[in-house]
Structure formats: structure tokens, C-alpha cells
Image (cartoon, rainbow, N blue to C red):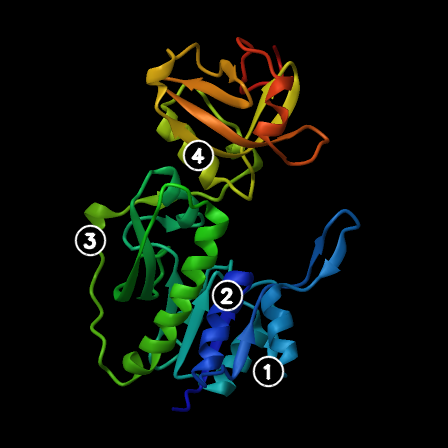
Amino acid sequence: MTIRYAFMGTPEFATVILDYLEMSSLLPSLIITQPDRPRGRGHKLTPPPVALWAKERDIPLMQPSNCRDKALYITLLKLRPEVIVTASFGQYLPETILTLPEKGCLNVHASLLPKYRGASPIQSAIMAGEKETGVTLMLMDKGIDTGPVLAQAKYLLDDEINAGELHCALANLGGELIACELPRYLSGELEAIDQDESMATETKRLRKRDGCIDFQRSARDVHNHIRAVSPWPGAYTFLDGKRYKLLRARVHDCGDFPCGDPGEIVVKGNRMFISCVGGVIELLDIQPQSGVKMCVRECAHNFKCGTIFRNTEEP
């Protein structure tokens, strides 16, 4: 099946979607992504993953700084796409683009809408302790992830998966979904179902400070927080004015010893536990300030019982 369409996306999540479209012989006629940005310590101008993907396949590419760019609109007018597909594009589409394709604009979103609209659906689902999430194929409107749902695929969450791992899993699930459902949508087989606004939740874009752990919460909440911000912005806390990254943990049955003050450290042999409100987590991997990642079993002896991890550098 030949489809004349444009694809809009930017990070690795979008390249995985494109991989599935390519495997289904559904390559886009035009790819639109964000401009090159400075990256790394040297601030070298670096193209986004989707730009590299397009260049490797010689697919026409545009990188407008703004979707209201006149050249973009003219190019799309000339292309006359049947549909526009977006996945993690990073810019809001103006109404002039939303209404340009005959079949509208579709978006692959990494949650089961209407839950977790917005910029951080993957992290928010983990932080909330969800047991199930997934991906949604939706018909876009002027709102943020508010358009009618066309199809969904569910994904069961275990207690250990972090945001980076879930990102990969949902990218693959989203790729399978759009490759299967795009032809069906264009042939009129999919019914657009309005979202239930009473069930809607919004998410915000994460900042570096969102990685700071508050041990004045339950052990389950702290464990979920650590998973949700891995690998970015990364969970962190402070001990004696030094910053430590908390890379991996698990909820511990604290029946064998009582909870201490929130953030209090208990070392037992080569294992380290941290008290939370009404519970305890066992820390498994840690990274000290200016140090490397370490398994706690290798460094637990460096920590003293009774010392307290805090959410501020001040002791």
C-alpha cells in the first residue's frame, strides 16, 4: 500500500516508530524534525536522531525552528499529504497544519489516554505506581493530547522497570501499533472515540530538580520515584553536603528492623537500607559525587548507621 504522508518526530522514540513503518513498506514522503542543537560539553551542533534517520535513507527532510514557518506550509501544500503522523515531535502544530491533510494529523502518544497527557507520560505512569500503561494512536486537535482515540495497545508494568526501559518498550509497541493501524485508518476501518475528560490527567516536562528524593514519603513512592527519573534527570540526595545519585533500589520488608527517621541509613553487612515514612527501601546501586556507579554491596561499609540522606546540601 502506497501512502503519501509526512512524518514529524525528533528523538529516538520517533526513530523506532519510523523503523516499524519502514519494515511495513510505509516510508514517509517527507520527514520534519527539530533543528540541530548544541550537545555535550563542547556544545557541538548535533542533528536530532530523526534527521540522521532521514538522511541515511535519502528522504526529503525539513527542520523548521517553528511550525508556523511559511516554507514548511508551502512544502506541505505541494505534497498534499493524505495524513501527517507525529511521534515525540516537540512542537505544537498550528491549525493551518492540523487541517491541511485530507485525513488529519495522527499522533502516537506513550500512555493510555486520557491518562497522562503532556510531556512526561512515561515517567508519570511509573511515579504514580501504575501496573499498566501503553500507547495511544489519536487524531490530533488543537488541545494537548486531547483528540479522539483511534487505537490503543496496553503494556503491563513490573515493579523494577525504569523510565528508560519503558521508553524502549513503548517505542516498539507504538511502532507496531501505527504500522498496523495506519492503513486501516486510511481505509475507514477505525472509529474515532472521544476521550473521557473526567479521567484526564496532565503531566509536566521534567526538570533536573525533579530528581531530588524526598524520604518523607512512603517506601513505595520513593522506589517509584527512583525508577521514574532513571536515566534522566536521575534520582539524587545529599549526605554530609555531598550529592549521591540513587540508581536502583527496591522496597524492603522492614519487619526485621524498625523504621528510623526519614532518610536514615541502616547498614547490615554489605547491604544498605534507607528509612522512609512507614517503610524502608534497600539501595542496590549508587553513584557518589564525581564518582562512578557502584553496587552497594561493594561500598556499604563506607556508610555509617544513623547518618541521614537529606534533600538539601545543608547538613
Cβ atoms at labels 1 and 2 below 8 Å apart: no
Q: CA distance from mark 4 to mark 3?
A: 27 Å
Q: Nearer the viewer, residue 72 or 205?
A: 205
Amino acid at circle 2: Ala
Q: CA distance from mark 2 to mark 3?
A: 27 Å
Amino acid at circle 3: Asp
Secondary structure category for the residue under label 1: loop
Q: Which residue is mark 3?
A: 196
Residue at screen point 37% across, 11% down:
258
**Between discs 4 and 3, the one toward the N terminus:** 3
Q: Which residue is mark 2?
A: 14
Q: CA distance from mark 3 to mark 1?
A: 38 Å
Q: CA distance from mark 1 to mark 2?
A: 15 Å
Q: Give residue 225's mark.
A: 4
Q: Which residue is mark 1?
A: 59
Secondary structure category for the residue under label 2: helix
**Between discs 2 and 4, the one toward the N terminus:** 2
Q: CA distance from mark 4 to mark 1?
A: 40 Å
Amino acid at circle 4: His
Q: CA distance from mark 2 to mark 4?
A: 25 Å
Cβ atoms at labels 4 and 3 below 8 Å apart: no
Q: Split into 4 quadrants, where in the image is the C terminus?
A: top right
Residue at screen point 34% across, 54% down:
111
Q: Nearer the viewer, residue 221 or 27?
A: 221
Residue 278 visible in the shown view: no
